[in-house]
Amino acid sequence: MGDENSEHLTLIRRWLAGEIVNNTVGIKIVGGPFNGRTKIVELDQTGLPPTGFRVRAGQAPGPGNPAAKHTYLAVRAPDTSAGWIYEHTEADTTTEE
């Protein structure tokens, strides 16, 4: 495993703490199967994160459809260091070929 004090790990910790470094920041995810995790994203020239993303839930046991794609949208959250969170909006249960 890498050195706990490496420059790379220090950078990751800064992002996860909500600090904007090199126009990149970690943004908390609220709701859905990824609640409480952080997505590291690059901000655009106006300081905005990507508007949203869709992810497929893992194969963990439990209710719901593991094949569903969950949609998250970026919303302003002034009480966080980065000022943004990703909020869960829905699970799309349609299948894609």
Image (cartoon, helix red, strand yellow):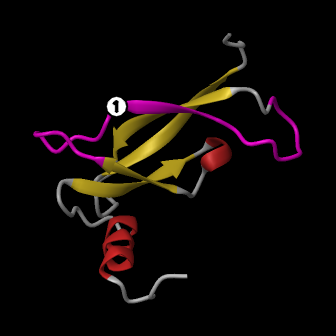
Answer left or right for 31 relative to 85: right
**Looking at the picture, how far across and down is residue 5, in whole percent?**
38, 89
Q: Main secondary structure of the magenta part?
A: loop
- Reading the image, the residue beneath label 1 is 51
**Looking at the picture, how far across and down is residue 34, in whole percent?**
62, 48
Residue at image point 22% right, 61% down: 20
Magenta stretch contains residue 44: yes
Magenta stretch contains residue 50: yes
Which quadrant holds the N terminus?
bottom right
**Looking at the picture, how far across and down is residue 57, in whole percent?**
69, 38
Extent of the magenta region: 42-65
**Looking at the picture, how far across and down is residue 27, in whole percent?**
39, 53
Answer left or right for 67 relative to 32: right
Mark 1 secondary-structure assignment: loop
Answer left or right for 28 relative to 24: right
Q: Residues within 10 Å of mark 1 (few under 14, many from 20)?
A: few
Residue at image point 34% right, 74% down: 8
Q: Which three-letter amino acid code belongs to the residue tagged 1?
A: Thr
Residue most extreme to the left: 45
* Between 15 and 78, the one nearer to me in the picture: 15
Which quadrant holds the C terminus?
top right
The quadrant where residue 47 appears = top left
Residue at image point 22% right, 45% down: 43
Q: Is residue 46 above or below residue 27?
A: above
Residue at image point 29% right, 64% down: 81
Give the number of callouts: 1
The quadrant where residue 14 appears = bottom left
Answer left or right for 82 relative to 26: left
